[in-house]
Amino acid sequence: MLVTLKQIADEAAERDYAVPAFNIFGYEDIIPVVRAAEEKRAPVILAANIPAIQHMPLAYLAPLMLQAAKSASVPVCVHLDHGKDFQSCSDAIENGFSSVMYDGSQLSLEENIRRTKEIADYAHQRGISVEAEIGSVGYSDPSIAMKHQLSDPDEVEQFVRETGIDAVAISVGTVHRMETQGASIDFDLLERIQSRVSIPLVIHGSSGVPDDQLRRLASYRVAKINIGTALRMAFGNTLRDEMEQKPKAFDRISLFGRPMTAVQEAATKKFSILGF
Ligand code: G3H
Ligand code: ZN
């Protein structure tokens, strides 16, 4: 069933589990992720980022995500990941998304608050949840010019108070697109932040977080854990292997079989670590 982020995040924040938000790019990962959630009887967040929407416009991608959510036996949130401006967020909402993230993390605090509040007001009038980021989770790829800055507890408190968002993404040691689990979470900073706000916390760049730290994160008021690279690696590396093993194969339906299973297995493993 289709749910908003708020409908699953408020409870996840209080309980000893966190809901994974998996980046999806099409049918071949939407279906395995929803199957993994159903197998675990767990809620899940399908997260479409801007590159995914550039590849498959919302007119195609949104109905696919919404159909998967509505026909699932578990709660599924259809979410925009790292929306870059008002337009990208309102487009997602017009296309039926139940939740949007606006990422103003590269702006000044004042400008981030101003733009985030505008989007939060617009979304809330339509019953849609909003996540936004304060501090900035950087990227392991040096060609992506995004700053990396740990979140400041004072700023998180002000940001949440003045924007009215439903969940806040914070920077406590993760980095986007890590291909190995070498990140180190600053749990002291996380504790100081969670003592200052009452809404659910979100961790981005979680592919790089070691399993024991992921488990520990779930026990804090962290409700949403964003995972992209780990599943993209599961699909892409398995596809490469499959093509190497079957050098004459060209039928993509058969070539996609094993990569889809690999995505489902990778998602299932993350669910287990996050408390399901
Ligand atoms: O917003 C998406 C996530 O933060 C994914 O990060 O690819 O490093 O797991 P990741
Ligand atoms: Zn992210």
Image (cartoon, grey):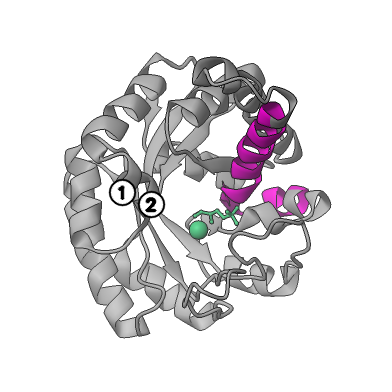
- Residue displayed at 16% across by 48% down: 125
Magenta span contains residue 232? yes
- Against 254, residue 90 (above or below) is below
Residue 34 appears in the picture as rendered: yes
Residue 268 appears in the picture as rendered: no
The region drawn magenta spans: 215-243
Left or right of 108? Residue 207 is right
* Mark 2 and mark 1 residues within 8 Å of each other at the beta carbon: yes
Query: What is the three-letter code of the residue carrying label 2?
Result: Pro
- Against 114, residue 166 (above or below) is above
Q: Which residue is mark 1?
A: 54
Identify the image quadrant of residue 106: bottom left
- Residue displayed at 19% across by 65% down: 118
Q: How many marks?
A: 2
For the residue labelled by badge 1, is the local secondary structure a helix, a strand or a loop? helix
Magenta: main secondary structure equals: helix
Q: Position of residue 193 (x, y in %)?
A: 59, 71
Q: Position of residue 195 (x, y in %)?
A: 60, 68
Say the numbered circle drawn on residue 265: none
For the residue labelled by badge 2, is the local secondary structure a helix, a strand or a loop? helix
Foreground pick, 263 / 192: 263
| The C terminus - image quarter | top right
Q: Position of residue 73 (x, y in %)?
A: 49, 14
Q: Which residue is mark 2?
A: 51
Quadrant where ligand 1 appears: bottom right
Identify the image quadrant of residue 116: bottom left
- Residue displayed at 34% across by 20% down: 67
